[in-house]
Image (tube, helix red, strand yellow):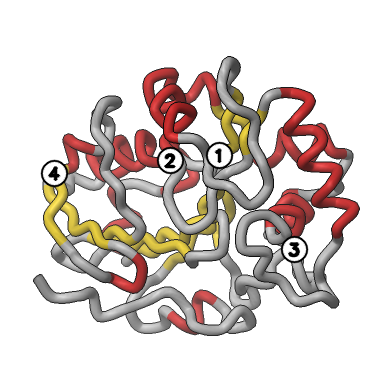
Amino acid sequence: MAQPPFSYPGDDDTPYLKHFEGKFASVFVTLNPFLSISGHAPYKNGDSIPDSVVHAAKLAGPSCGVSWQEIAELCGFPSIGHVNRALRLTGSKRISAKYANQDETDRMLNVCASQGIYPPGEGYASPLLELAMGAFARDLCQENLINAGPFGSFPKTLQNSDLPEKHQDCDWVELWTPDHSLYCSIDIDYHYYLICQTDESLKRAKPHAYFEGFYADTETSDLWGIGGLAPV
């Protein structure tokens, strides 16, 4: 099965709309939800979210989700951009020293630890994002999707009906439609998806109705909230 004729931007400072110019009309920065699940091993910075938490969250559904806006308010951050910056010192810790803020990361992790909240894992979809993607793809009238690993590796057909299935592990990193009207991708070190759509796709369903996030403007790149660039 052929890889898609598009990819995630290769450089942090490349504006999304410039990268996808001529292919997509819109890029929606889709925030992977935090999870509030009790009775499981606490989150440890640098570790993946325990599988038991992922499975429990998928069974619980949206009720266990914690938005980035809620996290910003709990931490006393002025915007979700600060949540993005704080998350960059978790996991792989891919962030330039001039942009990093250890105090914000520590504050966020302390808030999460005190309230039993798990930050989103980097480089893959939250179980709650998977569930929401099922409703989104359904309303786009897409029965079949193509799912793949990082960089479009090992693509295979995915039935849309599998996405909202709470006992199904979809295990996708990139996702796109056979007609190339929709492309969803995440950087292996970051915590949000880019949902890219053509005009025709946007007429059927708009992502802000299904996911927390914001539409990229002409300046939005992977430095949003990191290098002084705020989300719209």
Q: Which residue is mark 2?
A: 129
Q: Which residue is mark 3?
A: 225
Q: Which residue is mark 4?
A: 159
Amino acid type, residue under disc 1 in the picture: Pro
Residue at (63, 52) in percent of width and height: 46
Q: Quadrant of the N terminus?
A: bottom left
Q: Which residue is mark 1?
A: 33
31 is higher (above) or lower (below) than 57: below
Amino acid type, residue under disc 2 in the picture: Leu
Amino acid type, residue under disc 4 in the picture: Gln
Left/right of residue 224 with respect to residue 171 in the rendered view: right
For label 2, the crowd category at 10 Å Cα-Cα, with few meaning under 14, some 14 to 19 and many 20 or more, is many
Secondary structure, mark 4, is: strand
User: Residue 206 at x, y = what percent?
Assistant: 40, 48
- First in sequence, mark 1 or 2: give its number: 1
Distance (Cα) linking label 3 and label 2: 21 Å
- First in sequence, mark 1 or 3: give its number: 1
- First in sequence, mark 3 or 4: give its number: 4
